[in-house]
Amino acid sequence: MNIHERPRRLRRTEGMRRLVRQVHLDPANLILPVFVREGAKEPIAIGSMPGVVQHTQSSLKAAVNEAAKAGVGSVMIFGVPANKDANGDAACAHDSILADAIRWTKAEVGDSLPVIADLCLDEFTTHGHCGVLDAHGNVDNDATLAQYQHMAITLADAGADILGLSGMMDGQVGAVRTALDSQGKIDTVLLAYAAKYASAFYGPFRDAVESTLDGDRKSYQQDPGNVMEAIREVRLDVAEGADIVMVKPGLPYLDVIARVSGEVDIPVAAYVVSGESSMIEAAAAAGMLDRERAILETLTSVKRAGADIIATYWATEVAHLLNR
Ligand code: PBG
C-alpha cells in the first residue's frame, strides 16, 4: 500500500489523542443557571428538567458553594416570584426574589464566582411575555426598556456582577448601559443574549419558572430560518455596549455560534438550553445513549463551534468530571 498520509497515527493511543486534541472543556468557562423560588420551604423538583430544582435560600447557598468549589466560572440566577402583575413591577423591587438571591449568593461566594442576574420580565408578568403590553396586547418595545432600566439598577444595587439581557427588545443593551452609567455603575458587565431564537427547546424552562405564557415570542425572538439577522443583532449589541454576546439555544445553532465568533472581538457565550438537556436526560434514562459521553460531546461541540463560555445546567457535574 502506498499511503503516505495516515491520519490514524494520531489516534492510536489516548496519550496521542490527548496530545493533539484542540478543544478542551474547562470548568472556568461554564455558567451554572439556577432557579430560586420565593417562599419555597424545600427544593422543588422540576418535572421536565431531571436533576434541576427550584431552590430555597439554603439549597441555593449549597449549590453556589459547590459550584465555586468545583471551579465553575459563574452562576446565572433566575427568580421565580410568588406574585406576578401585568407590568412585572415586582422585578424592579429592591426585595424581589431575584435581588434577594443575588445578595444571598454574593454573601456566599464573594467575587470568586461572578454572579449573573437574568434581566427580563417574563417571570414577573401575569401574561408571561418578556415585556409590557400595549393597548392591543402587543409587546411594547420602548415601554419595556423603561422597566428594564429600573430592573437593571435594582439588580446592580443588589450586587450582580453581570446582567443577562434576555428579553430581545430593540435597544435594550444601550438603554440599560445608559441607565447604569447615569448612576455611576460603570463596572456592571452586560451579557447580551444577542442572537436568541424563538425555540421549542425552551419548553422545560417555562415549567421551571412557572411561566404563564399563552402564545409565543415570535415577534421579538428570532426566526430559526435566519442567520444574517443574528449578525445584525450582534453588531447592534456590540455597538450599544455589550461586553459578552450570547447565542441561544446551542446545539441546533452551531452554525450561528461559528458565524458570530468570527464576527466579534469580545467573548462569545452559548446557552445549552433546558430542552437540549432534557432530551439527553430522557434518552439516557431510556437506555438509548451513554449520558456522560453525550453531555461531554455536546459541550465540546458548542465550544468547538466557537463559544468561549457555555451556560449549562450540567456545569457543576461536568466540573466534577473534568476535575477527576
Ligand atoms: C426568558 C428566558 C428563557 C430562557 C432563558 N431566559 C425562555 C424564553 O425565552 O421563553 C430559556 C432557557 C432554557 O430553556 O434553558 N427570559
Image (cartoon, rainbow, N blue to C red):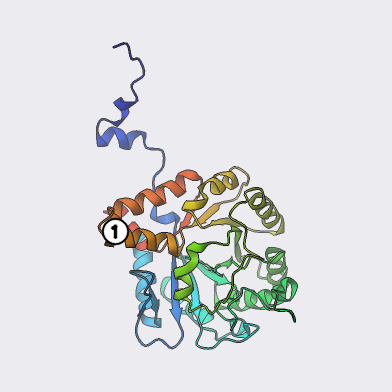
Which residue sits at x=45%, y=54%?
29
Viewer-nearest residue: 151 or 247: 247
- Which residue occupies the extreme front position in the image? 215
Q: Is residue 139 left or right of residue 299?
A: right
Seen in the picture, residue 179 relative to 235 is either above or below; the reply is below
* Residue 12 shows up from this direction: yes
Q: Residue at x 68, y 69 (%)?
A: 176
| Quadrant in the picture for residue 179 | bottom right
* Residue 174 at x, y percent in the picture: 71, 64
Give the residue pinned by disc 1. 284
Q: Looking at the image, which is closer to me, 229 or 66?
A: 229
Secondary structure category for the residue under label 1 = helix
In the image, residue 246 above or below residue 123: above
Q: Quadrant of the C terminus?
A: bottom left
Quarter of the rendering containing residue 292: bottom left
- The image quadrant that residue 16 belongs to is top left
> Is residue 250 shown left or right of residue 149?
left
Q: Label 1 is placed on what type of residue?
A: Ala
Closest to the observer: 117 or 282?
282
Going 67% across and 57% down the picture, which residue do you hit?
237
Residue 119, x across and y down, in percent: 59, 71
Badge 1: residue crowd in 10 Å (few <14, some 14–19, many ≥20):
some
Residue closer to the observer: 76 or 286: 286
The N terminus lies in which quarter of the figure?
top left
Q: Residue furthest top?
A: 2
